[in-house]
Image (cartoon, rainbow, N blue to C red):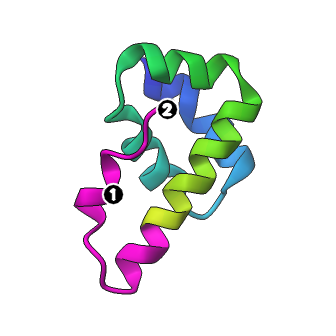
Amino acid sequence: MLGEQLYPLVKNIEHDYAGKITGMLLEMDKTEVLHLIESPDALKRKVSEAMDVLQRAGSGTDAADQLGSLSLN
């Protein structure tokens, strides 16, 4: 249900990786995901962070370790 709300918002920001980023964001705490749905600026920042993680993963660093950094802090 959260994914259905989050996906179109992410797709407006990052079309090519919307599914992957939505999945990454859904790993966060539910209250943090709700905050992202309600706050376009916070969502843009998290999508940018997620893209950084994906780019690092593509360059050989361990993306799994980076997923934990996707919090509101």
Check contact, mark 1 vs mark 2: CB within 8 A: no
Residue 70 location, x and y as percent?
Answer: 43, 43
Which image quarter: residue 2?
top left
Name the N-terminal-most of marks 1 and 2.
Answer: 1
Query: Where residue 21 appears, x then y in whole percent?
Result: 48, 50
What segment is highlighted magenta in the picture?
54-73
Q: Secondary structure at mark 1?
A: helix
Residue drawn at the location 31% of the way across and 35% of the way down: 27
Q: CA distance from mark 1 to mark 2?
A: 14 Å
Q: Is residue 6 magenta?
A: no
Q: Residue furthest bottom?
A: 59
What residue would you read off at disc 1?
A: 66
- Answer above or below: position of 49 versus 27: below
Picture coordinates of residue 56, whole percent (x, y): 42, 75
Q: Residue 32, percent across and down?
A: 47, 21
* Secondary structure found at label 2: loop
Determine whether 57 is above or below 33 in the image. below
Name the kind of residue labelled 1 in the image.
Answer: Gln
Going 74% across and 30% down the picture, which residue do you hit? 40
Kindly identify the amino acid type of the residue bearing the numbered disc 2: Asn
Q: Judge left or right: residue 38 versus residue 19.
A: right
Total residue callouts:
2
Quarter assignment of residue 9: top right
Residue designated by label 2? 73
Residue furthest to the front: 73
Q: Residue 37 is drawn in which quadrant?
A: top right
Q: Residues within 10 Å of mark 1 (few under 14, many from 20)?
A: some
Q: Label 2 neighbourhood size at 10 Å, few (<14), some (14-19), many (20+)?
A: few
